[in-house]
Amino acid sequence: MSLYQLSKFLYEINRDPAIQARFRANPQSALEGYDLTDEERGAILEPDIGLLYVLGVNGQILMHYAAFHGIEWSDYLQRMRDGIKRHGPVRAGLYAMTTSLDEKVSS
Amino acid sequence: MSLYQLSKFLYEINRDPAIQARFRANPQSALEGYDLTDEERGAILEPDIGLLYVLGVNGQILMHYAAFHGIEWSDYLQRMRDGIKRHGPVRAGLYAMTTSLDEKVSS
Amino acid sequence: MSLAFVGICSHAPGITGRADRADPAHRDQFYAALGRLREAVDAAKPDALMIVAAEHFANFFMNNMPAFAIGMGEKYEGPIEDPDWLKIKPRVVQGAPDLSRRLISSVMQSVDTAYAEEWRFDHGIMVPLHFLDPDNKYKVIPANINCQGPPLTPLHRAWAFGEAIRAAADALPERIALICTGGISHWPATPDSGKINEAWDREFLDRWARQDRAAMLSYTDAETYRDAGQGGFEIRTFIAAAGAARGKGEIWHYRAIPIFAVGCTVGVMEIV
Amino acid sequence: MSLAFVGICSHAPGITGRADRADPAHRDQFYAALGRLREAVDAAKPDALMIVAAEHFANFFMNNMPAFAIGMGEKYEGPIEDPDWLKIKPRVVQGAPDLSRRLISSVMQSVDTAYAEEWRFDHGIMVPLHFLDPDNKYKVIPANINCQGPPLTPLHRAWAFGEAIRAAADALPERIALICTGGISHWPATPDSGKINEAWDREFLDRWARQDRAAMLSYTDAETYRDAGQGGFEIRTFIAAAGAARGKGEIWHYRAIPIFAVGCTVGVMEIV
Ligand SMILES: [Fe+3]
Ligand SMILES: [Fe+3]
């Protein structure tokens, strides 16, 4: 359930200004009620966009969370690439179908 | 959209202790963000269970809202009956298919 | 390997919540029939229990009302109602996410089910589970048919849902026991709560037991609402059972128990 | 009275949001094709615009992911994204709740669509609306196909959805214009954002334009993901258009514009 819970938190903060405000005031408390591993919790709080990508979060959800943290578009893309270098290939979700970084082109 | 918005508020307060707490602290503020008529707003705040029934709220939603206000089961049923006497037949939703009170048996 | 068992039973909060207000002899006969159903499920040695229910605005609302939904969660919780009111203790139910995913993918070839990675069970699933899995030992796959918010799922699609579950289960290595739960006639949570149209119920159950597809699918929603109340829309779950099993049905128990607000039904159907 | 028009177009936030960063000549040709599509929609004099899109976790999530959904609201709002980022002003869009309800009830006879009485449009609907209804004059019926969260809607069911919309529209007194919007190949919001497989796109559009049902439905999800990225799953919306129109298609515009992160497509299909 963990990727689901992780994705759900990001989905909900993306679309709900009240959760965004709560996160800004007290990040830990905004995570209450989500069943997360320590690694997931840390990736959210840091935020470690690369690790979130490696954990399997869909880009259609992740890009809005990056924007919430003021991360500019090109930087967002680079953080995902760096995440794979640091943490290895995507572990779960749709992008786990991806095999290697070298196959990919970027822009 | 009004019966939808009315039903949605009741659906959400039924299943979310945070909304229940907000309603207890400040009923008006719990209604913010719902597009309600004055009649609907008044029926929620009173609470006028009979009027909510006449407005078309489904009993599967309404009974939990009545319980939230401490209204006992037999009283809940009686309030719906009284609502029809006072406000006329059900105006919208599934129960608008109902024709007259006399056709019905109760227990 | 197969669909290993198909049964039907009633659900209603009063069955557990108002147990002490029923005629003890009537209540105990009904409970005994549910116990017999539990033993039959156990004897089928299922790897998972699939429960097709008709939930009551606990998880699904008109902001996104699926005609069908199947759970794909690792675990579920219930009851969503006050446990003291329902007199069913909270439990965490183990899901079967991988099995669910394979089942859903197969069902989707012919029926466009929604899937749900979380689900808070209401009495529609908790009452059957309370009797059929008292030890909370089974992995559960919850499913839902929209019997609540019009436009309701058409009856012939509920049949197709049963057929799709059958085809999916037969292609899986696991053994699935299917329980479909609905109320037949009743007027839940309305001024007519407690009303039961026993003649209508017996006629429907007869059509069901003799596997008369055309007769089961011939009700219009307006007729059902008039004769069997909003609760009558839940015949969709029994129709899905018939679409899955395709054999003759056997009604083990039927009695109108007004304080339970439903005609209390237990039955099984031969899988052919 | 009928399905009065069927068209397809791309959506992507860059089409409006990064308009100033594209080659002006390429951008203007694409915009001109969208303008031509707008004129064609207007000429069809529709009573409502139905937009079949593939939204991106704006309204639908894995807690209740419908294979198909159709809106039934009185009104809708959009964009859900930051208007400054998308460069599309917020608007309230009029729905057609009664027409929607009749359409949904009809579609449900063969395709098990969810319905939704509210819907916050993301760029998947807002970008097409921005070009096709700049004056916000049309009543809109939004629809969605799950192209995002596996298990995805099977391709042949997307076709069936188009067929069901066609049958429903033809039985209604109102005139419906259908716009289906998807991305063909693209890798949105991933490290490969901006990649476009033009050869794959042209092959798909050829299959589409010549109304080759078998070829359109022959892609596996693994092949599509490999060759066309996650965004390629959105071919489902174009397939639904073909299932609805059933005639020959005509591609008015195709050009890969990497800063828009999508092969920018505009087309129409004859209704036969
Ligand atoms: Fe029920
Ligand atoms: Fe898209």
Image: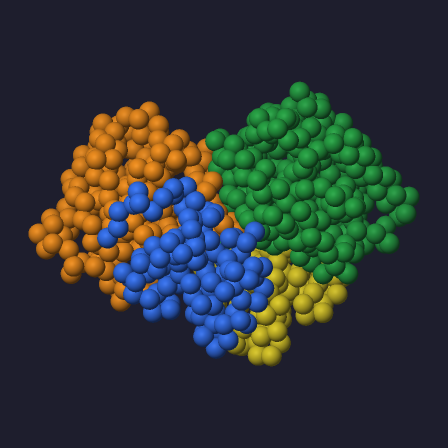
Chain colours: A blue, B yellow, C green, D orange
Is residue D5 or residue A61 the one in the foreground?
A: A61
Residue at 67 percent of width and 57 percent of height: C80
Query: From what the image shows, is residue C244 above or below residue D74?
Result: above
Q: Which residue, as the protein is rendered here, is positioned at the far right?
A: C25
Q: Position of residue C4 (x, y in %)?
A: 69, 28
Percent of width and height locating residue C7:
72, 33
Residue B81 falls left or right of residue C104: right
Corner quadrant of residue D59: bottom left
Relative to C68, say whether A80 is above or below: below
Pick out the residue farthest to the left. D25
Total number of numbered labels? 0
Q: Can residue D163 be seen in this snapshot? A: no
Q: Taking D199 as reference, is C85 left or right?
A: right
Q: Position of residue B106 (x, y in %)?
A: 74, 53
What residue is at 71 percent from the left and 33 percent from the top?
C46
Residue at the spot 60% in from the left edge and 48% down from the top edge: C74
Q: Position of residue A42 (x, y in %)?
A: 50, 65
Give the residue displayed 45% in from the left and 75% down from the top.
Answer: A24
Spot the residue most to the bottom: B25
Q: Is residue C50 left or right of residue D166?
A: right
Relative depth, front residue between C56 and D56: D56
Q: Name the quarter where the C terminus of chain C is drawn.
A: top right
Q: Residue furthest top?
A: C272
- The image quadrant where one finds the N terminus of chain C is top right
Residue C4 visible in the displayed image: yes
